[in-house]
Image (cartoon, rainbow, N blue to C red):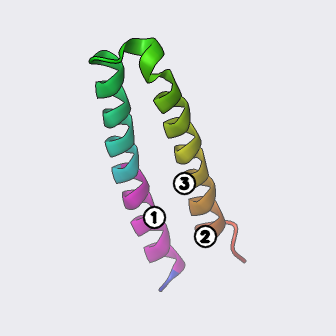
Amino acid sequence: MSPLVNFITGCIGLALLMIFTIGLSYSVSTGFAGFWGGLPLNIIVGFVLILALVNLYEETIGRK
């Protein structure tokens, strides 16, 4: 596929992943677990999103 198509589909996929994981983390933190109970999940979600962003960069922009 062309680099532009890879970039667009990667951004759409990253946006959907972010919406799902941040929404899940928010619902856990505001629900039964509370902030401190949801903190480990928030840390994991942040780490996973950073990894997904780095992977998107390496597959689209970083590739030469």
Residue at label 2?
A: 59
Q: Position of residue 16 (x, y in %)?
A: 34, 52
**Marks 2 and 1: in contact by CB < 8 Å?**
yes
Label 2 – label 3 distance at C-alpha: 11 Å
Q: Position of residue 61 (x, y in %)?
A: 64, 66
Q: Identify whether 57 is placed above or below 33.
A: below
In front here: 9 or 51? 51
Q: Position of residue 37 (x, y in %)?
A: 44, 18
In front here: 19 or 57? 19
Numbered tag placed on residue 52 in the rendering? 3
Q: Residue at (43%, 22%) from the top-left corner?
A: 38
Query: Which mark sits nearer the N-terminus, 3 or 1?
Result: 1
Label 3 – label 1 distance at C-alpha: 10 Å
Disc 3 on helix, strand or loop? helix
Q: Tag 1: Cα neighbours inside 10 Å, few (<14), some, or many (≥20)?
A: some
Residue 25 location, quadrant? top left
Type of secondary structure dominating the magenta stretch: helix
Disc 1 on helix, strand or loop? helix
Q: Identify whether 54 is placed above or below 31.
A: below
Residue 57 location, quadrant? bottom right
Residue at label 1?
A: 10
Q: What residue range appears in magenta? A: 3-15
Q: Amino acid at mark 2?
A: Glu
